[in-house]
Amino acid sequence: MTANPALAVRQTINHLEMRNIVKRFPGVLACDHVNFDVRAGEVHALLGENGAGKSTLMKVLYGLYRADEGEILIDGAEVSIGSPTAAIEQGIGMIHQHFMLVDELTVTENVALGLKSSRGPVLDLDKVEARIRELSGAYGLQINPSAPVWTLAVGERQRVEIIKALYRGAELLILDEPTAVLTPQEVEDLFATLDRMKRDGRGLIFISHKLHEVIAISDRITVLRGGALVDTVPNQNVTRATLAKMMVGREVILVQDHAVVEQGAVQLALHNVNALGITGQPALRDVSLEVHAGEILGVAGVSGNGQRELAEAIAGLRPISSGRIELGGIELGGIDVASWSVARRTDAGLGYVPEERMHDGIVQEFSVAENLILQDHTHAPISRGIFLDFGAIAQRSRDLVRDFRIRTPSIDTPTRSLSGGNIQKVIMARELSRNPRVLVAAQPTRGVDIGATEYIHERLLAQRRQGSATLLISEDLDEILALSDRIAVLYEGRVMDIIPRSEATAERLGLLMAGATAG
Amino acid sequence: MNLEIILHAGLATGTVLLFASIGELLAERSGILNLGVEGMMLIGAMTGFSMALATGNPWLGLLLAMLAAGVLSLAHGVVTISFQADQVVSGLALTFLGTGLALVLGNGLTGQNAPLIPNYDIAGLAAIPFIGPVFFEDHSPLVYLGYIFTPLVWFYIEKTRPGMHLRAVGEKPVAADTMGVSVYRLRYFYVFVGGCLAGLAGATISLSVSPGWYSAQTTSGQGWIAIGLVIFAQWNPLRAALGAYLFGALRRAILDLQGPRMILGFVNPLYINPNLGFFLQMAPYLLTILALVIGSRAAMRKRIGAPAALGEPYIRGERGL
């Protein structure tokens, strides 16, 4: 490896190969003799479920992990990449899923971080800024170089990350789930940028689990499953169904049957609800919406626009500063429950699948059985007086584990040791087994594998058929479009619009998510 | 009661707080809270005094004082940076360690006469009315050093590349790490620098400002005031210097208040009952407690601009890496 950074910045990477990469963690084989290569001027997608090994493989390439076996070759010569610095010197850049930006520094300072200055110890930010303007012009990456990063929107922060990598002369770019936080329009902009970089002769590795994006942007697609390579295929005649089958190892139903269901009375209504966020700023502003029996109301929006606060306000975990929350249509007569406790709302028929499933959804150290009865332990048949009926608990738990296809060694297994998808099934089983009149499901499939996602979608639609009212909060627009009857878009805590499924397109929702008013 | 004298003394004693709090500020900007300032200052004061006594050279004493406290601070570095232990607990332990060591090793130094760092006038500037006698006359060279040191530190943090790396490491170490900035090395460096400056502060007392070794009374809790000052200053070196001089002047003013029998035509209660003076002398420490309470509240810390990663160990491989 040559350690001359002045030369390294100019070198091109025509062909990068990773051969027989093995990475072991205690008890896990994260990468099992994986082969992967990328050429200049191509987008090579890396596809796989959570835990398939794609992040581990890329961290090996970026010098964050050291492979136990295998080699990395650039244009036929073996290289050793022991740190991110070494990766950058080799011309490899990485756009992390969680941005690696210092909020308090400006865009220019973030770009200059870690680099030598032309003026010795004194900063040469004016020169850096000029170069940033060049790059942003060349690649259509609009940015204000002197803005502190904390003032930027998510899409802008991603542009800073890309500029950071380009500034360092990255010839090969790893993009880790770059579209996860973007609106559809921002995704288009990103793809345009990626296209320019590709035509410039850069190699791009695109990590994603969104099948249609992978098909839209890539030249070749590599699928990993359980740490092992499934196949690398050219992007010709591949469909979402074939890719999904490669990822999961069996046929997957991607589009669920969204049959017409007759809708009933309003079961959940919010009138001009206002609430504050964690840091005391307004998080919900005059939110009004209604969900009917037999309806799924989807709530779309870019992360951090009030979704969490909305779910917590309805569940009773966050006090509202003004407005009404009404539960239960005719029987309850639209009673304002804003002052009710969580337990009282639960008893009135509210089910809640929280966004932070590890933190808010389960007690991690409790067994599967204990987590399954968390809501019912105060009632017969689970308890009598102060005593728990362990026979009844075991009976109920076994039924739910079977009905909801929860994969667990036993009902006494600590819940934290289950996979994300199975933990989510535990939560769904607990909430749905109580036949809630109203279900609030926040990000129900985030980080969940395709198989479990398919099943959770199936249950949500079954819930709809049975006539319960579901509020589905999700940042996954495909999920929203597939399941919802109507779609509300949140932007900066406001409901921008509520549109029926038939009129909703990704483009229209994307504009609303970016704060553009309808029209 | 003479304003000129109070301000003059304030600059001298304030210089002690200035070195200590800027040292702590640098460590905290890198993300490491070091509550061991008091212990490191005592080690510095003791080492400086005894080495000046042994070698006859107060400047050599000063240098060794910085080195001794710096080495002591590395213990905190090992525990909190390499072993990722709780910074508060380690810092408190460092105070006990430093204090204990200084008292044992300093046994017998009390009452000795070591060569001291002499005071100087700044020719020309001293002639300016009021300003001259307060700022540029009969001061320790260390006081003059403090005048230059503070703006230099500010420039370093805000305008230089290593300063930007310091800020990045304290705000979001993982981002700095991915950009090839060594978080561990920088944090060790600034903990060491903080230790050296605490040692300098201690030796400034024992060799210059109020010379001699009076065991734990030598520093009398000024290390804690320095930590509180960092919070009051909102991690800004210029404000820290201003606060240090103000606290210095306050200490002197409290002493002076006990002197006269009449103040502004009223009988001075402090003159009648000198015990009341003890309460006044508590004031800086009460303010310090207040600052520490404010500084330990997460929400408040965010609002007043504490480094985002202050107090959090950095472990590579966590949080998305």
Image: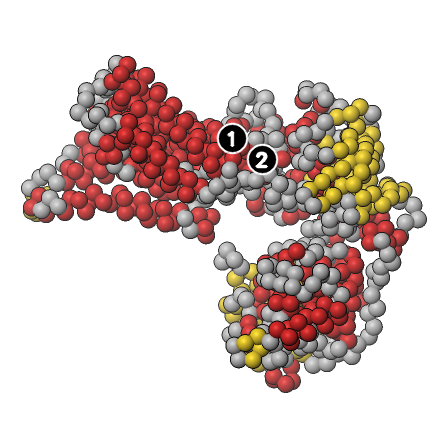
Residue drawn at point x = 41 percent, y = 27 percent:
B71
Res. A59 in view: yes
| Picture colour scheme | secondary structure
Quadrant in which the C terminus of chain A appears = bottom right
Q: Quadrant of residue A514?
A: bottom right
The nearer-to-camera label among 1 and 2 is 1
Q: Is residue B246 left or right of residue B32?
A: left
| Three-letter residue code for mark 2 | Ala
Q: Please name the residue that numbered disc 1 is placed on.
A: B186
Residue drawn at point x = 68 percent, y = 74 percent:
A395
Q: Quadrant of residue A494?
A: bottom right
Q: Chain of mark 2?
A: B
Rendered location of residue A270, percent (x, y)? 61, 72
Q: Chain of mark 1?
A: B
Between residue A79 and residue A255, name the one nearer to us.
A79
Residue drawn at point x = 59 percent, y = 35 percent:
B177
Q: Please name the residue that numbered disc 2 is placed on.
A: B176
Label 1: element kind: helix
Label 2: element kind: helix
Rendered location of residue A202, percent (x, y)? 79, 33
Q: Quadrant of residue A326?
A: bottom right
Residue drawn at point x = 53 percent, y = 80 percent:
A385
Quadrant in which the N terminus of chain A appears = top right
| Three-letter residue code for mark 1 | Leu
What is the distance, in whole Å, between disc 1 and disc 2 at their CAs?
Answer: 11 Å
* Contact (Cβ within 8 Å) of mark 1 with mark 2: yes
* Residue at the right extreme, as displayed: A237
Rendered location of residue A163, percent (x, y)? 68, 36
Q: Looking at the image, is A427 positioned above or below residue A292?
A: above
Using a 10 Å C-alpha cutoff, classify the residue at mark 1 as few (fewer than 14 neighbours), some (14 to 19) or many (20 or more): some
